[in-house]
Image: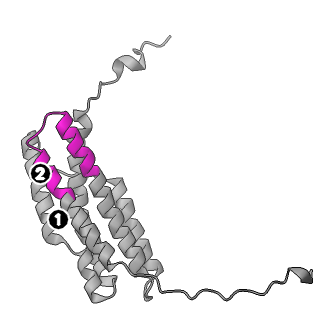
Amino acid sequence: MNSFPPKEEIMVEKKLDDPFLDTPEDFYFAEKQIPKALTTMARVAQPEEGKAGFLHRQETQGQIERLEQVFELLGKAARDKSCEAIQWIIAEGEEIMEAYKGTVAPDAGLISSAQAVEHYEISRYGTQIAWAEQLGLKDAVPFLQANPADEEATDQKLTQYSPRPPQIPRAKKLPDHSAVI
């Protein structure tokens, strides 16, 4: 006979504030990892003017400082927690750099990877803002709203530098060989 209480009785009730309190730790980790990855991508990117889309250290430092203010508002110490999603996105960028090293092909893939980082952050900050509003944590909202605005600006820069595919001439009409069968 099982002497343990039913699983339902030992489960700790989770509330919306639980993921809200955990998520800044993911952001904090991501904001500290991303500059390293983007700097590496910028070294590989061509042409020179395209490198600027990868480099936004000042914006990232501002984002980190705003996250630290959110931690302070929440009464928590600023700390990071490993974020597998951002690690995967960064690893994908590294794979692209390795696979296309020494060719002109990596730019489109690198920009795509960098934009995946930005889109991930934009979506996560959007969720965090909605949660802050639902939880009545209005003081945290302005700090959280500023970060996706930075991410959107970086995404636009990356789009501007995205290589355009060359114009491919239309194929000439092929002769009709259906009667040759």
User: Is 76 drawn above or below residue 150 in the view shown?
Assistant: above
Location of residue 137 (image quadrant): top left
Q: Position of residue 9 (x, y in %)?
A: 36, 16
Does residue 77 appear in the picture of this structure?
no
Q: Position of residue 112 (x, y in %)?
A: 39, 70
Q: Amino acid at mark 1?
A: Thr
Magenta highlight: main SS: helix
Q: Position of residue 124 (x, y in %)?
A: 28, 50
Comparing labels 1 and 2, the label whose residue is closer to the camera: 2
Q: Residue at point 90% right, 81% down?
A: 179
* Residue that extends furthest to the top in the rendered view of this protein: 1
Q: Work out whether residue 161 or residue 10 is closer to the camera in this orientation and state it.
A: 161
Write down the residue under mark 1: 60
Q: Residue at point 10% right, 55% down?
A: 66
In this picture, residue 29 sits left or right of residue 164 = left
Q: Which mark is residue 143?
A: 2
Q: Residue at point 7% right, 50% down?
A: 69
Q: Which residues are magenta?
A: 124-148
In this picture, residue 59 sits left or right of residue 151 = left
Q: Secondary structure at mark 1?
A: helix
Q: Which mark is residue 159?
A: none
* Residue that extends furthest to the right in the rendered view of this protein: 181
Q: Secondary structure at mark 2?
A: helix
Earlier in the chain: of badge 1 and badge 2, it is 1
Does residue 114 appear in the picture of this structure?
yes
Q: Position of residue 174 (x, y in %)?
A: 74, 86
Mark 1 to mark 2 CA distance (whole Å): 13 Å
